[in-house]
Image (cartoon, rainbow, N blue to C red):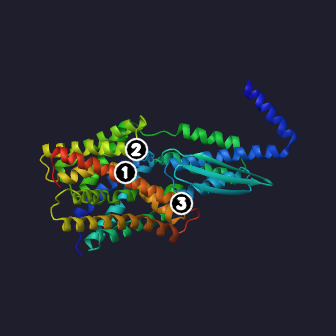
Amino acid sequence: MREVAESTTSDLRSNLDPAFGEVQELDRVAEAALYAATVLLEAGVRAKLVHEDCSRIARALGAEHVELGSGYASFEITIARGTSRITRMVEVGALGVNYQLSHAMRELAQRIGRGRNISAEALSEMTRIKRETGRHAPWVVALATGIACAAFGRLLGMDWSAFIPVLASGAIGQSVRHSLLRRGANVFVVAACVAFLASGLAELGAQWADSTTLHVAMIASVLLLVPGVPVLNAHYDILDGYPTLGTARAVFVGMILIFMTTGVLIAQMLVGLQQ
Amino acid sequence: MTVDLLHLLHQALFGGLAAVGFGILFNFGWRDLPWCAASGALALGTRTLGQEAGWSLEAASFVAAAAVGCAGQLLHARLGIGTNALAAAGCIPMVPGLYAAQAILGLYALTVPHPDDPAATALTTLQFTLRVAFTIGAIPTALSIATHLLPTRDRSSS
């Protein structure tokens, strides 16, 4: 009831004051552009492309002038049309990697850029994409991650005896990581815990399988934690002229590596393998 | 230069396998996974060839990433806006996680009360650290150079 009243008041005001209606429309454009930027950043897209797509969407929806600013945990936009100008900011959540979502959102941004659109329709289409883009089942991801760790081990010279133990410990590590992150645990603490668990299990398993490459097996089982995409994005962002975001990503990578190594070190001390 | 074909195939196979594993972790669709595998196999195959030719890990990684980047740009019409993401997925197995972990473990080893041969440990740690820094620098630099030297109609790939 109250919403209806507010909406009626707002409609009346925009009819009486065209500048107010213009600001309201710019608000909707900013909301759509910021939504796209948030989704893209959280899905692991580098800053330059997020800026390009965000700007493309805002212009296609009617903004004449667009300025953008990106931080590690926030994104700002200033848009103008005629004499009206607004600035809005949105908080960005944890930066992960989701290729299917980022790909679908970037395709939509390009489609929006090619035609005349209404901000409400654009926003509803973006919301639909985010809601409907699926992820692989957790057990598939865990198995694939285990296989990747074991393949990494082979690339690093690990013997065949340690292959299955590393595969299993990598898969278990990924399952535990998924479970802890879903419960909202701190990403760095999760890295240390998963590294401890996966490397400890890998070493015990590799010992049991008579492997002679225990050290490589321990490290290979935690390579799922090495943030490869943020490493590349940090470098890209600095190259593309976004040093603040690039540096923040690099610090994140460094912290993850420190926590990961701490987990491996504790496992080494407890299980007894000397470096 | 003699090439150990079996070793080359082994590295390419497991490079492709690692790239597919990480492709699933990064939520690539099933249709994109063969491209991830091809990208990883090309990256590791090229890097292995470079190392067998006597190049350093950093130089071989640079050339391998450039090869993957060039292949991606050439296939841009088919791959669309996902070109750079697929190239990056192929290069992920070249990120030197083992050396990064060993460098940090080396730093820990230097700070124990009575370290064994601290000079040798410090030197090894420094070598690992530099190797990580140069390799991590080489991969995206090569991918960027490939992207910029081989322009496509639409270069805005994720």
Relative to the observer, which residue lies in front, B34 or A259?
A259
Do the CB atoms of the residues marked 3 and 1 lie less than 8 Å apart?
A: no
Separation of marks 3 and 1 at Cα, in angstroms: 37 Å
Marks 1 & 2 on one chain? yes
Q: Residue at x 65, y 52 (%)?
A: A77
* Label ID, residue B77: 3
Mark closer to the observer (3, 1): 1
Query: What residue occupies the far front of the structure in this picture?
Result: B113
Query: What residue occupies the far left of the structure in this picture?
Result: A210
- Return the chain for callout 2: A
Marks 3 & 1 on one chain? no
The amino acid marked with disc number 2 is Val
- Return the chain for callout 3: B
Mark closer to the observer (2, 3): 2
Q: Is residue A7 left or right of residue B97?
A: right
Q: Is residue B86 visible?
A: no
Q: Residues within 10 Å of mark 1 (few under 14, many from 20)?
A: many
| Quarter that holds the N terminus of chain B | bottom left
Separation of marks 1 and 2 at Cα, in angstroms: 8 Å
Relative to the observer, which residue lies in front, A150 or B40?
A150
Q: Can residue B90 be seen in this view?
A: yes
Element marked by disc 2: helix
Count the marks: 3
Where is residue A24 drawn, in percent x and y? 76, 43
* Mark 2, residue position: A187
* Label ID, residue A256: 1
Element marked by disc 3: helix
First in sequence: mark 1 vs mark 2: 2
The amino acid marked with disc number 1 is Ile
The amino acid marked with disc number 3 is Ala
Element marked by disc 1: helix
Q: Which residue is drawn at 77% across and 32% down?
A: A7
